[in-house]
Amino acid sequence: MSIQANPTKAGVGLRLPHLAEVAAARPDVSWLEIHPENFIANPHALELLEELAADYPISVHTVGVSIGSVGGVDREHLQRVRTVVDRLDPFSVSGHLAWSTHQGEYLNDLLPLPYDEETLAILVDHLDEVQQGLGRPYLVENPSSYVGFTGSTVNEVEFLSELVARSGCGLLCDVSNIHVSSHNMGYDARAYLDGLPEAAIGELHLGGFTVEDDGNSGGKVLVDTHSDQIADPAWALYAHALQRFGPRPTLIEWDADLPPFATLLGEAARADRVAADVLGGGGSSRAALG
Ligand SMILES: [Fe+2]
């Protein structure tokens, strides 16, 4: 029986450089999210994680299950992820709306997909295979976007809503990705959140991004690097997400230029203050969002 996460207390991403410290110190953190790809070929790390999973709610977030690949889901990798999932019994299993393999080769980036009927049919088939292969429901995460496909026939919110309806999957709503994409693509981030199917939202993500020069437009482009503290506009959007959806397990996602674990706990504490403020647990929005 999975240990469920408290939806009003934020969790943090547990990356390998912090594993030994967390296993020894057992910090006061509500829940942990891991990438199974970090543990598949690392039996000692998986043993430590399994011990942690006895005490902390765990979310498994795969970066290697490629639901959008035309060539199909990598069944061997799916089975490896299933082995990790079965040992940890997480409260949530999720992955990206993207494809990261092509003709058997792994690509470094999570690449975008055109939002049309053909893509939808492929994803529904693949999600059926993934959810059956894992023996659990799967949450699909909204991507960060930098360019759109001219061939898309519906917008991302319409596409995700239809994907939920046809596949039975849930959604992992990455609030920072919405902020990044809305800046880069020029849409209204709050309207995006308002359009998502509330009942499908199983988890929220918050992560840092970097601001870079856009050589084409001469303006700025936001890049979803997970390498910094969460910026004020993303905190404000998080407050809007909580008003829209109510409490949801929220993750502080930090993958590159990892700071001390205490910094992640500080970001989680700030998320808790925003949640307490929005959901009526006290505090002031000026203090939480400032
Ligand atoms: Fe994310």
Image (cartoon, grey):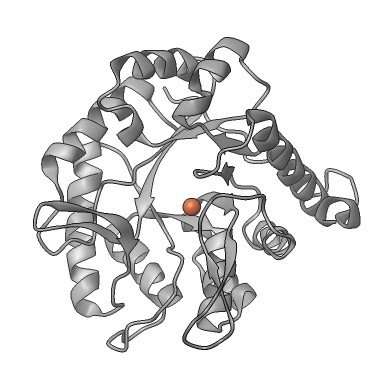
Residue 131: where, in percent of width, then height? Answer: 25, 45
Give me the residue at 36% from left, 13% from top: 47
Q: Does any portion of residue 9 appear in the rendered image?
A: no
| Number of numbered discs visible in the structure rendering | 0
Give me the residue at 30% from left, 39% from top: 136
Give me the residue at 22% from left, 79% from top: 117
Q: Is residue 47 above or below residue 281?
A: above
Quarter residue 56 falls in:
top right
Residue 272: where, in percent of width, then height? Answer: 74, 42
Position of 230 with respect to 217 (left or right) is right
Residue 213: where, in percent of width, then height? Answer: 56, 76
Q: Does any portion of residue 73 appear in the rendered image?
A: yes
Quarter residue 262 falls in:
top right
Position of 233 with respect to 83 (left or right) is right
The quadrant of the image that shows the N terminus is top left
Quarter residue 159 falls in:
bottom left
Give me the residue at 34% from left, 54% from top: 169
Q: Is residue 15 above or below residue 21?
A: below
The quadrant of the image that shows the C terminus is bottom right
Q: Is residue 278 above or below residue 41?
A: below
Residue 237: where, in percent of width, then height? Answer: 68, 64
